[in-house]
């Protein structure tokens, strides 16, 4: 029973206001994952406000306060007992502009590890080809890369017709399918405690380094940049993001210094792994379109400066997106 109504409101209203603020924040960012402390706070505020409502129900007066608390308790009940179902509704734009870049930054350590492995592979592949040109036949995954770069450049620059005519769409689809398979394989190999993902990141680096050194030694630097930059500045980071997801999965499997069961660790990382996979897939779709409709066209069809500038602009936009997008939402939370 409430004896002093004014004193009761003065004591409890700060908790009501705090509960309302927490609920408003969850509505504004439905994908936000609460920490253990925040979950405990939400539960405590919900139980305390529900108890206040029960005490207030015995009073015939103050109907407006009772309606306010009924609404507040109902909203809190939904978040505590059924909020996951409501927050699971996918909002594509919110996911793309906030969830994806925030997830990337939260797991950026795994991305740096994938990048280091690929860079080491690049160095190995480049040095192997620089010291032994016969290694090309062993390293290069596609037969058309075994020819001398100058021969390919001369052949493609002297073409009189559009060699991609009538098959741009199918070629783009093949690229998307192949690259997505490689990237998802990097994710799946995280189940080998990350060993398979490490090998795949290193191997892709070896190929990239060998190709780059092959064209550089043959004096075809401009052609190399015009050919690789338009799609490579998206395709290569997409593969690294796939490796990042694989290492996040591996970290959950290893569970070093985590006092949690395996099932709990996997549940915690599942959303991040799925988000990174989705982001990599979108990047690879764009890279496939660009490679089919732009990268495969060289002078005199398209000037190299235009293709290199396009690739540089893509890289700037991608870096801004991964490093800055969604920062405002993070600050509010």
Image (cartoon, grey):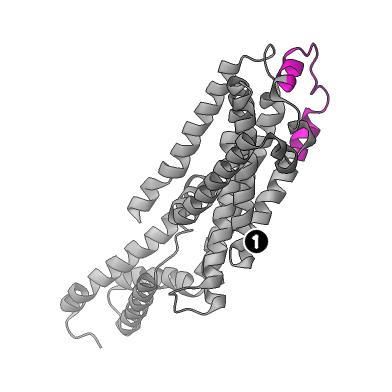
Disc count in the image?
Answer: 1
* Residue at 66% across, 30% down: 290
104 versus 137 height, above or below: below
**Residue nearest the observer in this picture, 42 or 323:** 323
- Provide residue 64's location: percent of width, then percent of height: 31, 68
Horizontal and vertical percent position of residue 79 = 46, 69
Q: Tell me the quarter of the picture where residue 25 sits.
A: bottom left
Q: Residue at x 76, y 12 (%)?
A: 158
Left or right, 158 with respect to 191, comes to: right
- Using the image, determine if residue 170 lies above or below residue 328: above
Residue 321: in sight, yes or no? yes
Numbered range of the magenta stretch: 151-174
Residue 164 lies in the magenta stretch: yes
Which residue corresponds to the image point at 68% horizontal and 11% vertical from the top-left? 300
Secondary element type, mark 1: helix
Residue 61 in the image: above or below residue 298? below
Classify 10 Å Cα crowding around label 1: few (below 14), some (14-19), many (20 and above).
many
In the image, what residue occupies the spot 79% across and 17% down?
Answer: 162
Residue at mark 1: 189
Residue 92, horizontal then vertical, whole percent: 57, 48
179 and 48: which is toward the camera: 179
Residue 72: image quadrant is bottom left
Classify the position of the C terminus by image quarter. Answer: bottom left
Could you say which is closer to the camera, residue 64 or residue 311?
A: 311
300 in magenta: no
The answer to whether residue 231 shows anywhere in this view is no
From the viewer's perspective, is 261 left or right of 282?
Answer: left
């Amino acid at each position: 029973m409430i004896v002093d109504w004014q004193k009761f409101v003065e004591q409890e209203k700060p908790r009501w206001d705090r509960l309302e603020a927490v609920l408003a924040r969850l509505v504004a960012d439905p994908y936000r994952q609460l920490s253990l402390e925040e979950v405990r706070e939400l539960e405590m505020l919900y139980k305390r406000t529900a108890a206040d409502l029960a005490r207030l129900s015995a009073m015939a007066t103050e109907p407006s306060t009772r309606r306010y608390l009924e609404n507040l308790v109902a909203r809190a009940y939904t978040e505590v007992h059924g909020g996951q179902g409501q927050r699971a509704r996918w909002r594509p734009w919110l996911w793309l502009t906030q969830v994806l870049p925030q997830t990337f930054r939260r797991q950026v350590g795994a991305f740096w590890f994938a990048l280091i492995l690929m860079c080491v592979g690049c160095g190995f592949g480049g040095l192997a080809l620089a010291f032994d040109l016969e290694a090309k036949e062993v390293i290069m995954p596609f037969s058309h890369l075994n020819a001398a770069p100058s021969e390919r450049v001369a052949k493609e620059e002297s073409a009189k017709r559009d060699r991609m005519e009538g098959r741009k769409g199918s070629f783009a689809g093949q690229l998307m399918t192949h690259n997505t398979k490689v990237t998802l394989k990097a994710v799946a190999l995280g189940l080998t405690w990350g060993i398979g993902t490490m090998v795949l990141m290193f191997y892709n680096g070896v190929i990239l380094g060998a190709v780059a050194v092959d064209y550089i030694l043959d004096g075809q630097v401009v052609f190399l940049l015009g050919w690789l930059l338009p799609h490579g500045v998206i395709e290569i980071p997409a593969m690294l993001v796939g490796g990042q997801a694989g290492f996040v999965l591996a970290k959950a499997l290893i569970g070093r210094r985590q006092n949690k069961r395996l099932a709990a660790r996997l549940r915690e990382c599942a959303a991040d792994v799925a988000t990174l996979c989705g982001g990599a897939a979108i990047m690879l779709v764009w890279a496939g379109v660009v490679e089919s409709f732009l990268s495969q066209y060289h002078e005199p069809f398209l000037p190299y400066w235009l293709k290199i500038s396009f690739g540089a602009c893509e890289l700037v936009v991608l870096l801004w997106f991964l490093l800055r997008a969604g920062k405002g939402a993070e600050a509010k939370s």
